[in-house]
Amino acid sequence: MPGFELFGEEEKKEIMDVLDTGVLFRYEFNDQRKGIYKVREFEEKFAQYCDASHAQAVTSGTAALKVALTALGVGPGDEVITQGFTFVATWEAILEVGAVPVFTEVDATLNMDPVDLQKKITAKTRCIIPVHMLGAQARIETIVDIAAQHGIPVLEDTAQAAGGRIKGKHLGSFGTCGTFSFDSVKTITTGEGGMIITDDAELWRAMSEYHDHGHDHKVNPGTRGGEGRNFIGFNYRMMELQGAIGIAQLAKLDNIVAAQQKNKAILKEAAAGIPGVAFRELIDEKGDSATFLTFTLQDRQHCQRVNESLRKDGHGAINFAENTWHFYPKWEHLLGGKTLTKSGYPFAEPGGKRRIVYDPLALPQSSALLERTLVYPVGIKMPAEKLEAQCRALKNATKV
Ligand SMILES: *Cc1c(COP(=O)(O)O)cnc(C)c1O
């Protein structure tokens, strides 16, 4: 799965370019930086790679979601629909802009169920965030069509699926905008970092200004201090060192995906021998970023028996129904409305009246699916012995 496996000479060389000038910041220091603008170059190359018109680098994937939602004008009084199987960051960002997250079921893609999405759109829905979870495609074309019928923008959370495609078109480029993460476990990493891509020049401009305290970035005689502003912003600026690492990692992305596809195919073949096993539905197998192998068993009991057998052989898989960071019923802090604010915001109105109540049993279809689903992360470098041992464990699990 992660780009950290490939941190090497290419990254070091890019970093040294920055250290040689001492300019660690993306803006200004024009004389000292000797023409080196790593964050800007990373943005340009990332946009080009995804075939998008614009890219905006920020400090994290979570910041990318917040900056995108803010630029889309989402705020208090609004609802944002996302799926109940995602990393907590997706809905943290929705709450962070003051809006209310509404959760859909996932279907056999393990991503947003378009049928349930249609039921959850209301007059207050201001954005839809499908997530390309575990490296593979949501039904993004159907979701974009549904959203267009209601005039609602689509933000693709592509944090886990950089390099993924559908019929050659990059994930993140189907919606109004798409966000990416480069944290420690993502397909490419900059340590911490994020990116937003869009074809909408106005939206990009709003993101660029908002992420930099509202600076309008217009050239003027007073340099940065003399720049104007159109609205209140915040600071989510990426550092030059991160941009430098990103350039080197991006150049490896297609090879990362190819290596993962190869390793995944070997594991998949071994898992295919388990009676009643089925694999997650992929919209386009060729465009799978292949960071994970995901398979479902006959029922919950069978799933537990299989995982017990795998664990016994030292190759236990992840069951996301048990994992507390990625699935709705396990988000006790969300369900319980736990917050540091004395007023109880964002779960309660300033007067103390609870404004959002989440039912832990609200997503039965997702629960039924995830409790019989097992997941293996797929590495870029998987030594033959390790792969063989894992395949042997899968073969042993055919008998339980
Ligand atoms: C990792 C992740 C994020 C957040 O990214 P950070 O860079 O860690 O802030 C958002 N959404 C999903 C689905 C993720 O997996």
Image: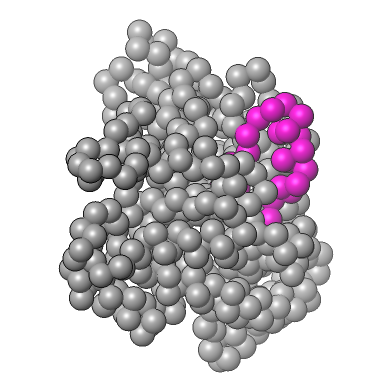
Measured as percent of width and height from the top left, residue 238 is found at: 33, 54
Against 368, residue 266 (above or below) is below
Residue 217 picture quarter: top left
Q: Which residues are magenta?
A: 130-157
Q: Residue furthest bottom?
A: 385
Q: Residue at x 35, y 12 (%)?
A: 350
Q: Is residue 181 visible?
A: yes
Quadrant of the rendering where the C terminus is positioned: bottom right
Q: Nearer the viewer, residue 243 or 3?
A: 243
Give the color scheme: rainbow, by chain, secondary structure or one colour: one colour
Residue at figure coordinates x 44%, y 37% from the top left: 206
Q: Is residue 286 left or right of residue 346?
A: right
Q: Check residue 27 for magenta coloring.
A: no
x, y (%) of residue 319? 58, 57
Residue depicted at 67% across the width and 20% down the height = 122
Residue 192 % position (x, y): 35, 59
Question: In screen coordinates, is 333 left or right of 34?
Answer: right
**In this orientation, does residue 60 appear?**
no
Locate residue 308: give its quadrant: bottom right
158 relative to 328, above or below: below
